[in-house]
Image (cartoon, rainbow, N blue to C red):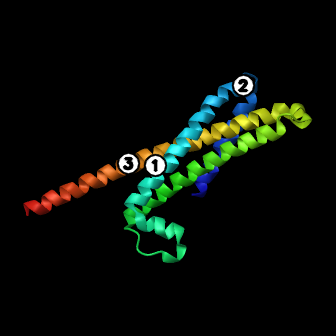
């Protein structure tokens, strides 16, 4: 896990450096569409995966809401899937929080003299944050795809096992 975190920090540093180098081409108007996509994708993933988790693993939701009621949730394979789904929900929530903070900071500071004096550093920082949130969102969508593929594989394995049992 620490290697993954380290690689994310390296990626974030590269995004900051890249945003700084191309800042003359960066225009906030171009960022609006990306922010809208991030908001919509986060809300969609947050909702759909949350409903999916609640429907398929109701004991997991009970354990999240009432930590003292942790009982047997599922097998080891299901536990990995539950961890992945909860991670997807958390990542989408972080993306939404990041967007809200971006707009709060933009609203609060864009009219200040401090912003005007430091726009050379603040502008690429804001763009880098949005680019990194995009990376997180793409990662979440990828995990949703992986989870669906795992589900289909498990489904077919169980169907095949049932066919073999029926033939015996």
Q: Earlier in the sequence, mark 1 or mark 2?
A: 2
Q: CA distance from mark 1 to mark 3?
A: 13 Å
Element carrying mark 1: helix
Picture mark count: 3
Q: Is residue 102 visible?
A: yes
Q: Which residue is mark 2?
A: 27
- In the picture, the quarter occupied by the N terminus is bottom right
Q: CA distance from mark 1 to mark 2?
A: 32 Å
- Report the residue that reaches farthest toward the left: 168
Q: Earlier in the sequence, mark 1 or mark 3?
A: 1
**Residue drawn at point x = 53 percent, y = 40 percent:** 41
Q: Earlier in the sequence, mark 2 or mark 3?
A: 2
Q: Sort mark 1 into few (<14), some (14-19) or many (20+) by Cα contacts within 10 Å.
A: few
Q: Which residue is mark 1?
A: 48
**Residue drawn at point x = 78 percent, y = 38 percent:** 107
Work out whether residue 72 or residue 46 is closer to the camera in this orientation and state it: 46
Element carrying mark 3: helix
Q: Which residue is mark 3?
A: 148
- Report the residue that reaches farthest toward the top: 25
- In the picture, the quarter occupied by the C terminus is bottom left
Element carrying mark 2: loop
Which quarter of the figure has residue 2?
bottom right
**Residue drawn at point x = 49 percent, y = 70 percent:** 63
Q: Position of residue 139 (x, y in %)?
A: 52, 44
Q: CA distance from mark 2 to mark 3?
A: 37 Å
């Amino acid at each position: 896990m620490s290697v993954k975190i380290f690689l994310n920090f390296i990626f974030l540093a590269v995004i900051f450096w890249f945003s700084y180098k191309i800042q003359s081409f960066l225009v906030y108007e171009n960022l609006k569409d990306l922010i809208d996509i991030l908001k919509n994708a986060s809300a969609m993933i947050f909702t759909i995966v949350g409903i999916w988790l609640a429907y398929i693993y109701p004991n997991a939701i009970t354990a999240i809401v009432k930590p003292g009621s942790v009982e047997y949730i599922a097998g080891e394979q299901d536990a990995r899937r539950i961890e992945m789904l909860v991670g997807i929900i958390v990542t989408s929530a972080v993306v939404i929080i990041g967007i809200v903070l971006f707009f709060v900071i933009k609203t609060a500071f864009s009219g200040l003299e401090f912003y005007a004096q430091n726009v050379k550093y603040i502008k690429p920082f804001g763009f880098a944050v949005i680019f990194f949130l995009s990376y997180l969102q793409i990662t979440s969508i990828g995990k949703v795809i992986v989870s669906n593929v795992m589900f289909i594989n498990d489904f077919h394995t169980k169907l095949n096992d049932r066919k073999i049992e029926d033939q015996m």
